[in-house]
Image: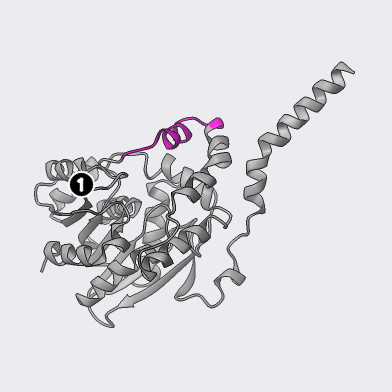
Amino acid sequence: MFWVLIVLVVALGAYVAAQPFLVERRRPVIGDAERQGARGEFVTLSQGVTHFRWAGSVRGPVAVVVHGISTPMIAMEGVAEDLGRLGYRVLMYDLYGRGLSDAPAGKQDRAFFVRQLADLCADQGVSEEITIAGFSMGGGIATAFASEYPHSVRQVILIASSGIATNESRFSRFCRRVPLLGDWVHAAFGHERMRKAIPSRGETPEIERVLNAQRKELRRRGYLPAQLLSRRGMLNESQEDDHRKLHRQGISVAAIWAREDPVISIRAVGLLGLWNRDARQEVVEGADHALPYTHKAEVAAALRATLRD
């Protein structure tokens, strides 16, 4: 009887431990049904299907915009529109594990994200004089891409960019640093934490659309694991060497920061200036980390102020 009890306890413990991962397995995979009728196009690249869309001017220099860790390309639509008004042809896309792109297994480090962007640019025939704009983790990806392909990039625009001075919660730090147990804690509690972090309503229809996209992300398979994989990969590095290299290469860098950003410390302004004294920087007063879609007019003004002629 004693051994039966032990077996039952062990079985129950295994069942409870497996639940967060089983819940993730039950979430729907992004496939043809979910992609039907979506704006934009889909292409199979070396690591999976990528959702992308062209916007802005019919002719003109090319700008690529890269969204952040948690929200798909819709978060950068305002920036894409602003660049379009400035005469750019704008290429937008969903990072792997977000939006309507595939969620391939494995590391989500700089090589993973740079490869996706390089594959997409090659597929679309984009190879030189690129302006690349990145928000949050997308800024880190933009920086890494420009560092690895300096002869293809004309200028880099960073919006509340990672890789310089990021504030990390104790929850995220624990999950990132601790293998196995960190995976379980993230799988068990990460979904609810992210759901609660999304505001209940947006102040404008445009903001509400972005918030709805964030809520929708939580229902797809692969999204929650992608957050942890990115924190252990792309977000787990300082990009001082990259920024110093961009300065040496003469690649123009413009940065836009939010004064009240709880995610990216305002210390980033000073650090980037130390690493690249030629970087042009603007700070949007009263804005937090959501500034690409909550402070569109201010970001547009900052873009005009910082972009090279």
Residue at image position (38%, 45%) is: 234
Comparing 152 with 236, the one in front is: 236
- Is residue 268 visible in the rendered structure shown here? yes
Q: Which SS does the magenta portion mostly show?
A: helix
**In the rendering, at what x and y percent does residue 107 appear?**
48, 45
Comparing 81 with 203, the one in front is: 203
Q: Which residues are magenta?
A: 167-181
**In the rendering, at what x and y percent does residue 275 appear?**
15, 42
**Residue at numbered disc 1:** 243
Amino acid tagged 1: His
Q: Is residue 83 left or right of residue 274?
A: right
Q: How many marks?
A: 1
Quarter occupied by residue 60: bottom left
Instruction: Tell whether position 170 is magenta.
Output: yes
Residue at far top of view: 2
What is the secondary structure assignment of the residue under circle 1?
A: helix
